[in-house]
Each structure stands twice: as C-alpha cells, then as structure tokens.
Amino acid sequence: MDVCHHGRIRCWECARVQELEERVQELEQAIREALGRTEYGSAGARTYVEYVLRKALGDDV
C-alpha cells in the first residue's frame, strides 16, 4: 500500500500532486521534442515561439 507523508493511505492531496507532477514532466518532454524539431526545420532563425517555449522550460534565452 502507498502511504503518503501525511501518514494516510494515499490521500487525495498527495495523489493529485503526483498526478500533476507527472503531467508537467510529460509537457516538458513534449516541448523539448517540439523544440528539437524546430531546430531541424528552421534555417537557424529563432522564432518567437521557440523563445517562449525555452523561457517556459527555464532554459537560457
């Protein structure tokens, strides 16, 4: 059984936090894959979309 830091058996708060953290990881991965594709597709031009995505990821812009 999963026991959360509250000492309960998988309380809804911990389950929701874990669910959101997993979703954030999925979105970060999707953004990184999209950025990888734009690097190959563009002729070195840095687009505003690429700038915003990198900023959202916390990368150096």
Image (tube, rainbow, N blue to C red):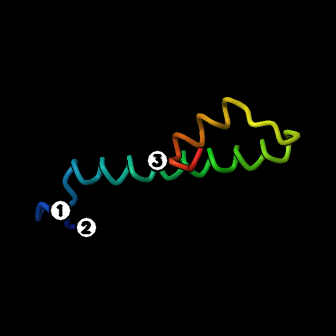
Q: In which quarter of the image is residue 61?
A: top right
Disc ID at residue 9: 1
Check whether the beta carbons of the residues at disc 2 and disc 1 lie within 8 A of each other.
yes
Q: Residue 31: x and y, percent?
A: 62, 44
Asked whether 34 or 57 is in front, the reply is: 57
Side of 45 where 4 appears, left or right = left
In the orientation shown, which residue stands out farthest toward the bottom?
A: 1
Query: Observer-nearest residue: 47 or 38?
Result: 47
Q: Residue furthest right?
A: 43
Residue drawn at x 64%, y 50% is: 32
Which secondary structure lies at badge 2? loop
| Picture residue at 57% right of the left edge, 49% below the top | 60
Q: What residue type is labelled 2?
A: Asp
Q: In this view, does 9 lie to the left or right of 25?
A: left
Residue furthest to the top in view is 48
Q: Of callouts 2 and 1, which one flags the residue occurring earlier in the amino acid sequence?
A: 2
- The tag on residue 25 is none
As drawn, the residue found furthest toward the front would be 61
- Give the residue displayed 25% in from the left and 67% down from the top: 2
N-terminal of the pair, mark 3 or mark 1, is 1
The numbered mark at residue 23 is 3
Q: Mark 2 points at which residue?
A: 2
Q: Which amino acid does label 1 sit on?
A: Ile
Q: Residue 12, percent across and down?
A: 22, 48
Q: Position of residue 18 (x, y in %)?
A: 34, 54
How far apart are the alpha carbons under marks 3 and 1?
22 Å
Marks 2 and 3, how far apart at CA: 20 Å
Discs 3/1, front: 3
